[in-house]
Every structure is written in structure tokens, then in C-alpha cells.
Image: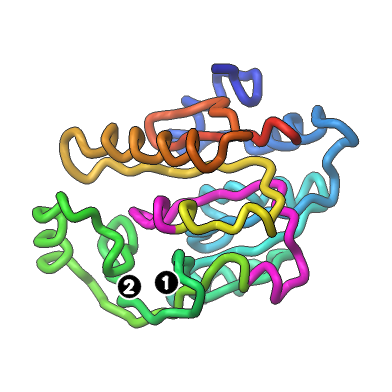
């Protein structure tokens, strides 16, 4: 495994929310042909600024992209940020057609109903007892959104969806989308489940994303780079 950015301090800073995201610019500038004017997807974009994984790419390298955020309160804040990107107030799912799901807003995150693993019965109970607000939101197949904005090349895909990663990645039409770098978060809900989820996702990546190499990981995120990129 190699260090994606070549700067070990990045990971410690990333976890504390103090990362100098200009390091993303350093990484992309080191790629063949510079990688200016790239295209990103950030699913779970929050308010479009705080701990954004794509903002510095937009500011420093003239990227644009797709910002996806299901929480209507977070989305309203994101609209006010004037990001140079397409904004979607909704979520992603692995089906072929749009689908309405219930979004449970908790104190620290928002979770779409149906994307909590079957083994997480205690977390189901936690949601029932700690939901601040429940809102119905529309979720879309990723390909539908990309076709709507006329884009099928994705240079960087940041996936922070609190449990829906497997559903989305297992149905992504790789014959129709060129994906270069994937970052996904795997979150610990119960003891031991984070590693179980990581094993499941790695198995999926080995079997379905054979050309992708795991190039870096943190306690929260794992990064995969297309070897043809």
C-alpha cells in the first residue's frame, strides 16, 4: 500500500478536520497532464464547505462536479455557498429508477431508512429513539444524474453515505462510467462492525473493481485508484 499523497501529516489532520486541502491540488497536479478542469462527485456533501473533500479542487484546479446532499437543511446552506457545481437535494441508491426514502436526521449524521445493516438491530433502536427529524427524500441512480448533467467521466468520487456504499457500488455501471479515484467512508456503529464492513467492501472491490488498487486508508476512509488512470 502506498501513501496517496506522499505526506503522512495529511491523515492526522484529516481526522481532526484541520487538513490543508491544498494537498489535493498537489496530488492532482502530479498526475499526467496536470488534471486541471476535472470532475468530482461528493455524495454526502453536507453544507458544501465544512470538511468538504472537493472544495479545494474547485478553487485551486478549476474543477466542477456534482454535490449530492439529502438533508434539506444542509442543502439550503450549500445553495448559499455559491459552489461551481451541480447541486442535488437527494441521495443515491442502487436501483434503476428514482426512489423515495425516509431520511432520519440524528445529532451527528443523517441516515436513509433501509441502509442500516441487518445486524445493527441496536442501531435501528437508536434511530427510533434519537431521530430529530424524519423527512422523505428522493434518491437516484448515479448514472441518471451523470447523464442529466452530460458527464460520464468522474475523476474523483467521494462517497459518504452512512451505510449505502455497498448498494451503490455493487450496481454502478462501470461499462458506462469512467471512474478514476474513489474515496469512501466506512463508519463504526457497533463493536467489530467497521471491520466487517471493510471486509465486505474490499471483497466487492476485488471482484467487481479489479482494475482499482487500494492506495490509502484511514480509520474512517479508504481510497481506491483506477490502475488505468
**Is 27 on the left or on the right of 7, as rendered?**
right
The x and y percentages for residue 188 are 27, 41
Residue pictured at 20% horizontal, 69% vertical: 131
Quadrant housing the N terminus: top right
Question: Which circle, 2 or 1, is nearer the viewer?
Answer: 2
Residue 91 in the magenta stretch? The answer is no
Which residue carries the number 2 mark? 103
Residue closer to the observer: 222 or 61: 222
Asked if disc 2 and disc 1 are in contact, CB closer than 8 Å, the reply is yes
Residue pictured at 17% horizontal, 42% vertical: 190
Residues in magenta, as a range:
145-167
**Is 184 on the left or on the right of 42, as rendered?**
left
The x and y percentages for residue 72 are 44, 77
Residue pictured at 33% horizontal, 67% vertical: 112
Residue closer to the observer: 226 or 190: 226
Q: Secondary structure at mark 1?
A: loop
Which residue carries the number 1 mark? 71
Earlier in the chain: of badge 2 and badge 1, it is 1
Q: Secondary structure at mark 2?
A: strand
The x and y percentages for residue 197 are 31, 40
Reply above or below: 3 against 165. above
Residue pictured at 17% horizontal, 64% vertical: 127
Characterize the local packing of mark 1: few (<14), some (14-19) or many (20 or more) Cα atoms within 10 angstroms: many
Amino acid at each position: 500500500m502506498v501513501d496517496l499523497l506522499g505526506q503522512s501529516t495529511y491523515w492526522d489532520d484529516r481526522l481532526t478536520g484541520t487538513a490543508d486541502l491544498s494537498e489535493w491540488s498537489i496530488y492532482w497536479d502530479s498526475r499526467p497532464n496536470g488534471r486541471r478542469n476535472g470532475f468530482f462527485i461528493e455524495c454526502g456533501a453536507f453544507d458544501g464547505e465544512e470538511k468538504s473533500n472537493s472544495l479545494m479542487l474547485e478553487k485551486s484546479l478549476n474543477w466542477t462536479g456534482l454535490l449530492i446532499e439529502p438533508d434539506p437543511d444542509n442543502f439550503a446552506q450549500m445553495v448559499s455557498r455559491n459552489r461551481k457545481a451541480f447541486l442535488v437535494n437527494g441521495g443515491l441508491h442502487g436501483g434503476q429508477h428514482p426512489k423515495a426514502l425516509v431520511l432520519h436526521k440524528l445529532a451527528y449524521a443523517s441516515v436513509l431508512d433501509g441502509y442500516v445493516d441487518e445486524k445493527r438491530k441496536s442501531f435501528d433502536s437508536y434511530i427510533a429513539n434519537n431521530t430529530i427529524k424524519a423527512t422523505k427524500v428522493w434518491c437516484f441512480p448515479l448514472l441518471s444524474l451523470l447523464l442529466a448533467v452530460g458527464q460520464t467521466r468522474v475523476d474523483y468520487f467521494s462517497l459518504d453515505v452512512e451505510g449505502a456504499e455497498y448498494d451503490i457500488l455493487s450496481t454502478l455501471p462501470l461499462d458506462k462510467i469512467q471512474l478514476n479515484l474513489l474515496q469512501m467512508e466506512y463508519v463504526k456503529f457497533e463493536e467489530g462492525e467497521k471491520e466487517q464492513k471493510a471486509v465486505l467492501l474490499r471483497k466487492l472491490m476485488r471482484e467487481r473493481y479489479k482494475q482499482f488498487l487500494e492506495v490509502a486508508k484511514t480509520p474512517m476512509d479508504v481510497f481506491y485508484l483506477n490502475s488505468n488512470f
